Image (tube, rainbow, N blue to C red):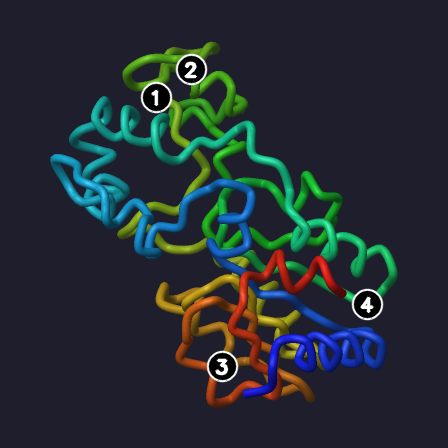
Amino acid sequence: MKNTQDAIQELKQIIETYDNIVFFGGAGVSTESGIPDFRSVDGLYHQQYDYPPETILSHTFYRHYGEEFFRFYRNKMLFLDAKPNAAHLKLAELEQKGKLRAVITQNIDGLHQAAGSKTVLELHGSVLRNYCERCGEYHDVTYIQESSGIPKCKKCGGPVKPDVVLYEEGLDQKTLNSAVRYIQKAQVLIIGGTSLAVYPAAGLIDYFQGDKLVVVNKAPTPRDNHADLLLQAPIGEVFSQL
C-alpha cells in the first residue's frame, strides 16, 4: 500500500482524468461531523441499553414498543447541530465541477444535501423526512425531536414514522435501481467511510465495471484487495487535501 501522501496525489490525478465519478459512502463520512458510527469501537453498538441497537431499530420493535423506540431514536439518532465536513463539501464541489455524477449514501443525516450536493441517493432514508402512517402528512425533524412518546400527526392524529429504513424493512426499489445504474455507468467508484458490512447496500459494489475502484476507509474492508487505490485514513482528512 502506498503512503498516504502519494495515494492522495494519485487520487487527485484520477479525479482530474475522469468526469464520471460516483461516490458510495457510509457512517465514516459523518463521524468527523460528530455523528457516532454504529460499528466503531466507541459507536452505539458498544454502549449499553436494555436492548441492543439492532433490536431497537427494527420494524418489529418499532411496532410493539413505540415509546421505547422513539426515546432511543431522539437520543441517539438525531444530531441536528451536525455540520458538513471536508468530505461532504469536496463531494459537492466535484459535482458542481461536473466530475461527480452521484453520491450514494447509507447515512440518514442529510449532510450531503446540506453541503450542496444535488444528486444524493439515500439508501436508508433520512431523519429529516417523517410521514403520518395514516394520512401521509409530512412532518419535519424538529417536530419529531420536540414531541414526546410516539409522535402524532398534526392533521389526523395518526402515528408519524421517520422515513428511515429499519432492520427487517426493504430498501426503496426506485432508489436501489437508480444506484445500480449510476454504479454500472461509472468510470470511477470511490468507496468512502464504510466497512461494507451492511447488505443489501454493500452488494451494490458488485455492479461496478469501470476503470478505477478507490477505497478510503480507516479500517480494512472486504474490497481492499480489489481496489486500484487504497487509503486507510479518515475520509475528511483525505478529502481536505484534494
Crowd rating for badge 4 (residues with CA inside 10 Å; few <14, some 14–19, many 20+): some
Separation (CA) of disc 4 from disc 1? 42 Å
x and y, in percent, of residue 152 in the image? 37, 15
- Nearest the eye: 190 or 230: 230
Dot 1 corresponds to which residue? Answer: 159
Q: State the SS at label 1.
A: loop
Separation (CA) of disc 3 from disc 4? 22 Å
Residue occupying the far right of the picture? 97
Dot 3 corresponds to which residue? Answer: 206
- Nearest the eye: 186 or 191: 191
Crowd rating for badge 1 (residues with CA inside 10 Å; few <14, some 14–19, many 20+): some
Crowd rating for badge 3 (residues with CA inside 10 Å; few <14, some 14–19, many 20+): few
Taking the spot 49% from the left edge, 81% from the top edge, the residue there is 206
Separation (CA) of disc 4 from disc 2? 42 Å
x and y, in percent, of residue 66 in the image? 23, 26
Residue 34 lies, with reference to residue 179, above or below; the image says above
The numbered mark, 2 or 3, whose residue comes first in the sequence reads: 2
Dot 4 corresponds to which residue? Answer: 99
Taking the spot 53% from the left edge, 28% from the top edge, the residue there is 80
Separation (CA) of disc 2 from disc 1? 6 Å
**Amino acid type for the residue under numbered disc 3:** Asp
Asked if disc 2 and disc 1 are in contact, CB closer than 8 Å, the reply is: yes
Q: Which is more foreground, mark 3 or mark 1?
A: 3
Dot 2 corresponds to which residue? Answer: 153
Judged left or right of residue 115, residue 39 is left
Question: In which image quadrant can residue 171 be found?
Answer: bottom left
**Amino acid type for the residue under numbered disc 4:** Lys
Crowd rating for badge 2 (residues with CA inside 10 Å; few <14, some 14–19, many 20+): many
